[in-house]
């Protein structure tokens, strides 16, 4: 898109001003009018390497579309349609004239990719700070902390399913596909392995002996296929000359390293050994099982979040694929809040964060963490206010998951998951706290 500044403000005889069409009482317009667009545009310019694009109105349009996407939580194709017909979307992008405009849905994807996570976090912090300033003075230093998991878009993993995914990839994408290019044929036993796995899946309640038997078979198939894939890739490395072939080789090599690691881990599990950093997804190896101990779902797979609520604002303290301890997450969150220059006078948390009494004293924070067992002295935060703060926290988590799509994230990459969480926090603070 090459749009000049004059094109955003130019009028024709039959054109209508967007300010006249959109009511001043419109909630989305009120939010957009409060934002510091000059500062946001500076962040938008960082997504462009060319000076020409930085000087024209493209960064303003794209950062406006980015903010609008945070508010409405729609797919990229739906945003493409909104850019054509929706008045608020065009108003957010900085246009003054009502006109049908076209944009490809991949443009916003590329913009978000070039913007990078560091700049997205800075935009989040900017809106977070403005939201806290908008709260009543009595609530500015009062925080309620809790942890939750934003689930990633992966199927529920089992050992047999994971090994079958790895074996299928090695056979179809490496041994067969690349094997033709290097004139190699291998006896990979693909049909036999698939038949064994399907027959096992048909069993409603398999016995322990049957599970052990299929795991042993799959480990044998996988060991053979890994050796065959290594031979194919060694030959392919010698042949590959073009950039595309070298890129393909690097991609397949990294996949083979992950496949080897999964094989080693599954072999250790079969032998009854304990393993750390267990891989549960072949295509998303950074995802770890996060044990929550809930009755509905014991283990969740995704990004663990440490958040606080300050009035109506959600403050993102920590996000990680690792299952960090709630108490450690609370300490890191308090430190990040203070680094941002925000006040923190008191903090409430559940029993999972117990053991931070000394830390709260050192930081000069009123301790509202629920303790285990009998309490010798009355709590620093009264019970009624503690319950109110906890209820607000749980409600905020429910809203950010249901309304802003953190219940089941559709992203397929690590950056996509983290970007979605940041956008959800921006959207929540703009809609409810700004």
Image (cartoon, grey):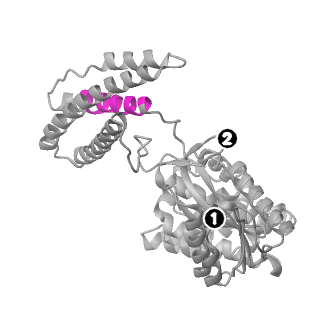
Is disc 1 in contact with disc 2, using a CB cutoff of under 8 Å? no
Q: Is residue 162 magenta?
A: yes
User: Exactly how many numbered labels are in the figure?
Assistant: 2
Residue drawn 60% across and 52% down?
A: 149
- Residue matched to label 2: 295
Residue drawn 23% across and 33% down?
A: 178
Observer-nearest residue: 188 or 106? Answer: 188
Magenta segment: 160-177
Kindly indicate the quadrant of the structure image that contains residue 161.
top left
Above or below for 335 versus 104: below
Label 1 or label 2, whichever comes before in sequence order: 2
Kindly indicate the quadrant of the structure image that contains residue 359.
bottom right
Q: Can see residue 4?
A: no
Observer-nearest residue: 92 or 375? Answer: 375
Kindly indicate the quadrant of the structure image that contains residue 205.
top right
Observer-nearest residue: 236 or 372? Answer: 372
Density class for disc 1 (Cα within 10 Å; few <14, some 14-19, many ≥20) is many
Q: Whole-Å distance between the Cαs marked 1 and 2?
A: 20 Å
Above or below for 73 versus 32: above
- Residue 337: image x %, image y %? 62, 76
- Residue matched to label 1: 353
- Residue 207: image x %, image y %? 48, 20
Residue drawn 56% across and 56% down?
A: 304
SS at mark 2?
Answer: loop
Left or right: residue 374 versus residue 7 is: right
Residue drawn 64% across and 66% down?
A: 354
Left or right: residue 188 versus residue 12 is: left
- Figure quadrant of the C terminus: bottom right
- Residue 17: image x %, image y %? 78, 65
């Amino acid at each position: 898109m090459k749009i000049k500044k004059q094109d955003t403000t130019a009028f024709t005889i039959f054109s209508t001003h967007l300010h006249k069409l959109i009511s001043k009482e419109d909630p989305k317009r009120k939010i957009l009018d409060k934002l510091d667009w000059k500062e946001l545009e500076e962040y938008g310019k960082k997504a462009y390497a060319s000076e020409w694009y930085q000087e024209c109105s493209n960064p303003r349009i794209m950062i406006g579309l980015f903010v609008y996407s945070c508010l409405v939580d729609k797919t990229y194709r739906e945003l493409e349609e909104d850019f054509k017909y929706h008045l608020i979307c065009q108003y957010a992008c900085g246009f003054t004239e009502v006109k049908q405009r076209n944009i490809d849905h991949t443009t916003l994807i590329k913009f978000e990719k070039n913007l990078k996570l560091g700049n997205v976090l800075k935009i989040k912090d900017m809106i977070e700070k403005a939201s806290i300033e908008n709260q009543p003075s009595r609530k500015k230093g009062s925080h309620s902390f809790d942890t939750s998991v934003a689930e990633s878009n992966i199927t529920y993993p089992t050992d047999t399913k994971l090994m079958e995914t790895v074996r299928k990839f090695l056979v179809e994408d490496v041994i067969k596909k690349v094997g033709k290019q290097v004139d190699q044929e291998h006896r990979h036993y693909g049909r036999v392995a698939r038949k064994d796995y399907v027959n096992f899946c048909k069993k409603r309640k398999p016995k322990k002996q049957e599970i052990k038997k299929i795991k042993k078979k799959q480990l044998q198939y996988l060991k053979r296929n890994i050796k065959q894939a290594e031979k194919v890739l060694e030959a392919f490395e010698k042949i590959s000359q073009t950039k595309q072939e070298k890129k393909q080789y690097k991609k397949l090599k990294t996949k083979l390293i992950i496949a080897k690691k999964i094989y080693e881990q599954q072999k250790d599990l079969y032998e009854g050994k304990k393993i750390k950093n267990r891989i549960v997804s072949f295509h998303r190896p950074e995802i770890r099982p996060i044990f929550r101990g809930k009755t509905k779902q014991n283990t969740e797979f995704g990004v663990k979040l440490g958040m606080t609520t300050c009035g109506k604002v959600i403050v993102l303290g920590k996000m990680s694929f690792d299952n960090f301890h709630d108490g450690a997450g609370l300490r890191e969150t308090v430190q990040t809040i203070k680094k941002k220059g925000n006040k923190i006078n008191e903090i409430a948390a559940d029993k999972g964060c117990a053991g931070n009494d000394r830390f709260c004293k050192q930081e000069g924070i009123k301790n509202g963490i629920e303790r285990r067992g009998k309490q010798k002295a009355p709590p620093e935060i009264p019970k009624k206010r503690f319950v109110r703060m906890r209820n607000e926290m749980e409600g905020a988590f429910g809203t950010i998951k249901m309304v802003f799509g953190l219940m089941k994230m559709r992203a397929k990459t690590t950056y996509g998951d983290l970007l979605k969480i940041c956008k959800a926090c921006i959207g929540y603070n703009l809609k409810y706290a700004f």
